[in-house]
Image (tube, grey):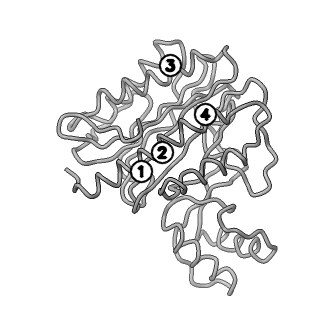
Amino acid sequence: MLPKDVIKCYIKAGRIASEVREKVKGLVKEDVSILEICNFVENKIEEKGGKLAFPCNICVNDVAAHYSSSINDETVIPRNAVVKIDLGVHVDGYIADTATTVCLNHQYDGMVYAINEALKQAIKAVKPGIKNNHIGSIIQKTIERYGFKPIWNLSGHQMTRYVLHTGKSIPNVSRFGLSKIKEGEVFAIEPFLTMRSGAGEVTGLNRTYIYRFHKTHRNLNKDADKLQKLIKKRFNSLPFSKRWLNESSEKMEKAFSVILAKKSITGYPVLAERSGNIVAQAEHTVIVTKKGCLVTTL
């Protein structure tokens, strides 16, 4: 099992994440600025003593993941939207990752119920020795029982200190695999679903708002080298937003373009359901214990 001081950090991160997730739900309304919601979430996390594990994702309707406002984003929540809020907190590098779906159109209430039930059933199955793909099978069967389709190419993920995605994954569909989860491992379990008529998969759009440090590149100009060092020091390997660099000058933009081209940093493209159908998401972080799991983000 994990050391007590590590578990304490995970629990604190989870408590902060849960409190902010529940509080932000009331802010999601028609015509509210997405940038305002992102800033609210990120500021609240820091006010409560946590640090940002990644930029707040606010994904509307068919967009499933990786939309976070740029510094001058004027996008607002549209009428009758289905809105996914995905947020992350870390305490000393130990991460809590959680998400919820807010539905402004009662036509899609069933989607929200189904995705929450899929997450609930998946968590019930977690214990040492269970195969990851068995949890995926439970998620798929639950989603399909309610008349929806899982997103097959999105999955939950193992997390370690300062690393958001590592090692093993928790699929959202049944698939062949021999990997088993072990006591002391930490996972973000996050089912996604769409309408039965949807493609059931996401595709990358030509838009990127979230980045992470990848590797140090030594042959850079002075400004790019300075920015590369700043990003590595401030964010480690965790995802970040250009909004967090507190500068939008022409010099910074040029330096950013250089380190991106040199692959010192990499980007996460916005992901949308391939057929344009509505997507719902739910997510909790769990620590695998001797007989089951501890959910840190309830």
The Cα–Cα distance between marks 2 and 4, rounded to whole angstroms, is 13 Å
x, y (%) of residue 251? Answer: 78, 77
Mark earlier in primary sequence (3, 1): 1
Q: Is residue 253 left or right of residue 132?
A: right
Q: Which mark is residue 13?
A: 1
The Cα–Cα distance between marks 1 and 2, rounded to whole angstroms, is 6 Å
x, y (%) of residue 193? Answer: 54, 26
Residue receiving disc 2: 17
Please rate how many residues cluster around mark 1, counting C-alpha atoms within 10 Å: few if below 14, some from 14 to 19, many from 20: many
The Cα–Cα distance between marks 1 and 4, rounded to whole angstroms, is 19 Å
Report helix, strand or loop for mark 4.
helix
Report helix, strand or loop for mark 3.
helix
- Marks 2 & 4, CB-CB < 8 Å contact: no
Residue receiving disc 3: 114
The Cα–Cα distance between marks 3 and 2, rounded to whole angstroms, is 22 Å
- Looking at the image, which is closer to me, 167 or 75? 75
Q: Amino acid at mark 1?
A: Ala
User: Measured along the vertical axis of the image, is residue 229 above or below residue 282?
Assistant: below
Residue receiving disc 4: 25
Q: Quadrant of the C terminus?
A: top left
Q: Nearer the viewer, mark 3 or mark 2?
A: 2
Q: Amino acid at mark 2?
A: Ala
Q: Amino acid at mark 3?
A: Ala
The quarter holding residue 141 reads: top left
Residue at 64% x, 24% y is 103
x, y (%) of residue 176? Answer: 34, 33
